[in-house]
Amino acid sequence: MKHKFGIGERVYFTASNVSRPAAGGVYQVIRLLPTDGDDCQYRIKSSSEAFERVAKESQLQLC
């Protein structure tokens, strides 16, 4: 599978209601991660948080 977003791109993250609560908003793609089943994964970072998150491609939209 090919990743839809590239390193450095700004994306809008929408948290899943099923997983741990997370703040939605604008993030930057930090790293491309291996796929999880049929969904690509990314490491993303918000400028307002001190840590990075892992997000699935289905949770992201291009800003």
Image: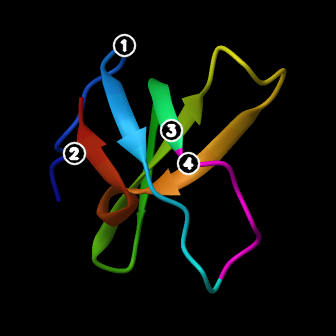
Foreground mark, 3 or 2, reads 3
Q: Tell me the element at label 4.
A: loop
Label 4–label 3 contact, CB within 8 A: yes
Q: Earlier in the sequence, mark 2 or mark 4?
A: 2
For image coordinates 76% across by 71% down, the residue present is: 20
Q: CA distance from mark 2 to mark 1?
A: 13 Å
Q: What secondary structure is found at the residue carrying circle 1?
A: loop
Q: Which mark is residue 24?
A: 4
Q: Residues within 10 Å of mark 3 (few under 14, many from 20)?
A: few
Label 3 is placed on what type of residue? Answer: Gly
For the point 46% across and 30% down, the residue is: 26
Label of residue 8 in the image: 1
- Residue matched to label 3: 25
Secondary structure at badge 2 equals loop
Region rendered in magenta? 19-24
Of tags 4 and 1, the one toward the viewer is 4
Distance from label 4 to label 3 (Cα)? 4 Å
Cα distance between the residues tagged 3 and 2: 20 Å
Q: Percent x, y for residue 47?
A: 65, 14
Q: CA distance from mark 3 to mark 1?
A: 16 Å
Q: Quadrant of residue 52?
A: top right
Q: Position of residue 57 (x, y in %)?
A: 33, 57
What residue is disc 2 on?
3
First reached walking from the N terminus: tag 3 or tag 1: 1
Give the x, y percent position of residue 7: 35, 19
Q: Residues within 10 Å of mark 2 (few under 14, many from 20)?
A: some
Q: Is residue 39 above or below residue 33?
A: below
